[in-house]
Image: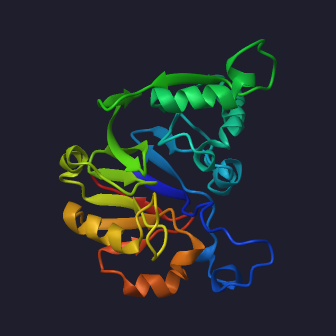
Amino acid sequence: MKITFLGTGTSQGVPVIGCTCDVCRSLDYRDKRLRTALHIAIDGQSLVIDTGPDFRQQMLREYIERLDAVLFTHAHRDHTAGLDDVRAYNFLQDMDMPIYGTQATLDQLAVEYAYALSGPVYPGIPRLKLLPINEDAFTVNGISILPLPVMHLRMPVFGFRLGNFSYITDANYIPEETFERLKGTEVLVLNALQREHHISHFNLGEALDTIQRIAPKQTYLTHISHKLGLHGAVQHELPASVALAYDGLQVDIVS
């Protein structure tokens, strides 16, 4: 399995145009963060978790020529606003795109993409096949996926586990039942928004405490705001087994 970080940033704390903060002025490519999303290549399948506003740019940048399914963590726009651009894959592959999410997430997509999901069909609109999931394990073209229910303040969000890899973003609370599902995780991706406390996201300290409890061999932090600081500076503060992810980072995971 190979994971590619399509984006590691967030709309939270985005500075205004003309900002001269250290992150904005940084020449380090690792400080240039598009909205959080992940690509997974596994057993001949090409999966994406979330399609934020930067989805088209991210897929072009990584030369991802095929897409077999999209998994959604939740329905916030910074994770769903690029879904229209799956239409290129509809055309290339001549197939409706399978879209997996909770019923609440799919209901919101049905509102935001009503032109594609209701009314007359006309050429060029995205072709979407909405597939509801719950907390039970499910399969995508033979790939077993285990949902990881977490909370984003009061909003339920799904992380996902594939084999020994677990992915969680937009969380500030993990239930005990989900910690049980995380046992044996060897590679973890977890959100760490900033240094200060946040109402609906783990900050850096909370993320590190959570990592210590899960005890994976390697962790990558994502959903990073400008407020966390420069990549190079933050990385020097982290334990050896924890790394800041960056856009375009690719990691091979051995099951």
Image quarter of residue 185: bottom left
Q: Residue 181, position in %: x, y?
A: 22, 45
The residue that appears at 25% across and 59% down in the rendered structure is 186
Q: Specify the color scheme.
A: rainbow
Image quarter of residue 197: bottom left
Horizontal arrangement in the rendering, residue 199 relative to residue 84 (left or right) = left
Horizontal arrangement in the rendering, residue 148 relative to residue 244 (left or right) = left
Front-most of residues 86 and 176: 176
Horizontal arrangement in the rendering, residue 165 relative to residue 243 (left or right) = left
The residue that appears at 50% across and 39% down in the rendered structure is 72
The residue that appears at 38% across and 86% down in the rendered structure is 237
Q: How many marks?
A: 0
Q: Residue 233, position in %: x, y?
A: 49, 87
Q: Is residue 54 above or below residue 141?
A: below
Q: Residue 101, position in %: x, y?
A: 47, 32
Horizontal arrangement in the rendering, residue 209 relative to residue 244 (left or right) = left
Image quarter of residue 118: top right
Res 86 seen here:
yes
Q: Residue 81, position in %: x, y?
A: 67, 43
The residue that appears at 41% across and 87% down in the rendered structure is 236
Judged from this view, the residue extending furthest toward the top is: 120
Res 142 seen here:
no
Q: Is residue 125 above or below residue 160?
A: above
